[in-house]
Every structure is written in structure tokens, then in C-alpha cells.
Image: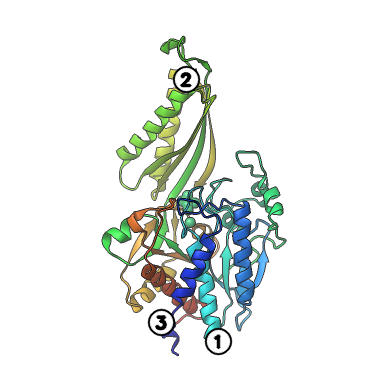
Amino acid sequence: MNNADLRLSSERLLANLDTLSAIGATPEGGVRRLALSDADKEGRDLVTGWMKELGLSVRIDRIGNIIGTRAGQENLAPVMTGSHIDTVFNGGNLDGNLGVLAGLEVIETLNEASIETSRPLAVAVFTNEEGARFQPDMMGSLVYAGGYELEKALNTQDDQGVLLGDELRLIGYAGDMPCGETTPSAFVELHIEQGPILEREGITLGVVENLQGISWTEVIFSGQANHAGTTPMHLRRDAGYCAGALTAFVHEMAKQIGGAQVATVGVIELEPNIINVVPSRARVTVDLRNPDNARLIAAENRLQDFLSDLAKAEDVEVQTNSLARFDPVQFDDGIAQRIEDHARALGHSCRRMTSGAGHDAQMMSRICPTAMIFTPSVNGVSHNPAEATAAEDIMAGANVLLHTLLDLTKEHPGPIA
Ligand code: HGY
Ligand code: MN
Ligand code: MN
């Protein structure tokens, strides 16, 4: 068979996605597989078992990243694909999982066709991409790319005070391989778009050429608990009011800035959280994103100015902690062009686009030529049990991944057939 006619098995890939989705399945039909939880361990055990069945050499690095490698004919740097299998608290079945299992399906298809590649081919499962339990997000790939100290990552605590390093040992994935030991020759990640653009435009695939900047801030307001009935409004030091004012401010600020600016208050925790007590303390998280770094910095500065004015006006203390800050990322145009050429050669409509979400690829782009493939999300929904992508779109993206990876495993990738 001419390699150009090679296709993945949709039955097998879709079945494997269902099998993995059963681990951490929620009653709403989604998945809860928080990083380094028992469900994450179970998912990791399933995936590493599949890697071994495929004959991959499986190694775990010191932050728990799993790297399965299929040997090449030459001892060259591998082409790498992959993503993550940890989810947010109320996640869907595809976010991250698709990129990992499509990578394994590529391996299985090459094994079945007895196709050898000159470069090795690796599939990565990165630790804690979501940052839902331990911040920052994309932590495993960031450590792999040398952007975050391993010790700092291992000493990260979740909101119960549990150390990431202890959890890693507990689930048996505190590996001994140095992080980032192997620099891939290229990294390509398949991921759902998690937004509305492809579906709205009726386009099958996204060729992701850049990714927006991300700023996560934790804001702590400290006021004074007081009686809800006896305390006059002008004598209150109301942390709960400040949390609400901040939420309204970031929402309005993003709308005023316009363009691609987005802002989200995802967490509001009040203490003592009792109906008849003026809140003494509020913990609030602010997620700001913009593909233009100057605008993102301007939004961050407006946030800080608002907080200092609010603290003065309401006589509360305010403390901010940066939980994550990543500049916008430009992917490799050569890799993006190959993705686009393969999409068109396979007869799929596609368009260049920016990623609104963070991904492991943004960290891998620090160390090797990198780009991404997006498949459409039904109703643009993600980080939600309703997350879905049509089977034919999943296979379109996965087959473009197959041919892009196959192409890149040639020592000198030639023109697209
Ligand atoms: O936050 C993000 O964009 C990613 O889902 N971790
Ligand atoms: Mn993801
Ligand atoms: Mn996600």
C-alpha cells in the first residue's frame, strides 16, 4: 500500500477513547480525572499498558511525564506527539485524551502496516496540563521544556496542602528519567478546538499557528467578619462585596478592551461563608488572556489599579499571587504548513487559527519546531461534560496527524505526495 493511502482505524481509536473515558466517569457523562488523583493513576496505568502492548519503550520522568518511544531505523531525535489525560473537575472525554490516543493509534497503524521510520516516533502524556489542582497549568511540559524548576513543581501544594511530589510517589509515577532528556526534532499535538470557530465556519480542521498569552492571579481580600444585621454599611470591611466587585470589573474590562481579550473569575471562596456574617476573607482567581502581550499587560495593570482603589475604598487588605503567566506563543510555520498541506491532500477544509486555550504544545515550542491540529467542538463547548466532536472530524484530525508525523519522521521531509 502506498503510504499516502494509509488510514487509522476509527473503530479502535473511538473504542479506546471510550475505554479511557470510563476512568473517572461522572454521572453527567463527563470525566473527572484530576492530576495525580487515583483516577489519573488508573488512566496512566491503562495508557502505559497500551504503550507496552505496542512495543514502545516506556519511560517516566521525574515530574511524571510518560514518554513512549517507537524505535526508528536511525538513532536520531524522535518526532513527538501527545498531550495530557488529566482533566478539569467537570471535564469532557476528549480534552487531551484525543491527542494521546490518536498518537497511540498512529503507532498501532504503522505497526500493522510494518512501516519503519528513519526517525523514532514518541508519544507523550504530560503531567498536570490542566492546572485545576496544582498551578501553574501545563506544568509537566513546562518542566520538560526547562521553563519551571523541578523542585518547585514537586513542592507545589493543592488547596488541601497536599504536595505534588508526594502524590506522584503515591500513584507510582515519580520516575527517574531526567526531565527533557530528549529534545524532539518536532512536536505536533492534536487537540479539540474547545471553541466555536470551526463549527461556525463549517471547517473541518484548524491549523494552529499561535496561542494566546495567559495570566492567572489569585486575589485574597482580608476584611472583618461582622454581624449582617447590626453593622451599618459604612462601617463594614466586606471581603464578599470586594469579590463581587472584582468579578464585575474583570468582566466589564474585557468587554471594554474588546478584540480577543477574555477574563474569567473561576473561583470565589468566602469565609466564614455564613448567611448572617459579613465575609472576613475572600479568595478569588482571575484568568486573563490575549494573543497580544502588550494588551494583556495593560489588562493586568488595570486589574492591579482597580484592586488598590477598591482596598482603600472598602478598608480591606488585598494580596495578589501570580499562579501562571505565559507570553503568547508563535508556532513553527514550516510544521503548520505541513499540517495544512496534509489536510488538503486528504481532502479536508482547514484554516489557520489561534489557540484560545493553553496546551502542552506551547511549552514544547520552546525547545523544538511545534504546531497543532484542531478538530471542531460541538456547540464550541469544552471543560464541560457536554464536550463532543463528530467521529468523522476526530478521524480527519487523527489521519492528518498520522501523515504529518510520518512525513516528519523522514530525515529530510520531502514535498507532500
Ligand atoms: O487553561 C487552559 O487553557 C488549559 O485547559 N489548561
Ligand atoms: Mn487540553
Ligand atoms: Mn483543558
| Residue 114: % across, % down | 55, 86
Q: Secondary structure at mark 2?
A: loop
* Front-lying residue, 309 or 375: 375
| Residue 19: % across, % down | 53, 65
Q: Is residue 193 visible?
A: yes
Which residue is the site of mark 2?
238
The three-letter code of the residue at mark 2 reads Asp
**Dot 3: within a 10 Å radius of its alpha carbon, few (fewer than 14), some, or many (20 or more) residues?**
few
- Report how far apart the C-alphas of labels 3 and 1 lie in the structure: 23 Å
Q: Is residue 374 above or below residue 76?
A: above
Q: Is mark 2 within 8 Å of ligand 1?
A: no
Marks 1 and 3: in contact by CB < 8 Å?
A: no
- Report how far apart the C-alphas of labels 2 and 3 lie in the structure: 65 Å
**Dot 2: within a 10 Å radius of its alpha carbon, few (fewer than 14), some, or many (20 or more) residues?**
many
Total labels drawn: 3
The three-letter code of the residue at mark 1 reads Ser
Query: In the shown orientation, is residue 404 left or right of residue 51?
Result: left
Of the numbered discs 2 and 1, the one sitting upstream in the chain is 1
> Residue at position x 64%, y 42% from top?
157
The three-letter code of the residue at mark 3 reads Pro
> Residue at position x 33%, y 75% from top?
344
Q: Is residue 365 visible?
A: no
* Front-lying residue, 153 or 10: 10
Q: Is residue 407 above or below residue 372?
A: below
| Residue 284: % across, % down | 49, 33
Which residue is the site of mark 3?
415
- Residue 295, located in which quarter of the rendered image? top left
**Dot 1: within a 10 Å radius of its alpha carbon, few (fewer than 14), some, or many (20 or more) residues?**
few
Disc marking residue 114: 1
Query: Residue lying farthest left?
Result: 201
The N terminus appears in which quarter of the rendering?
bottom left
- Report how far apart the C-alphas of labels 2 and 1 lie in the structure: 68 Å
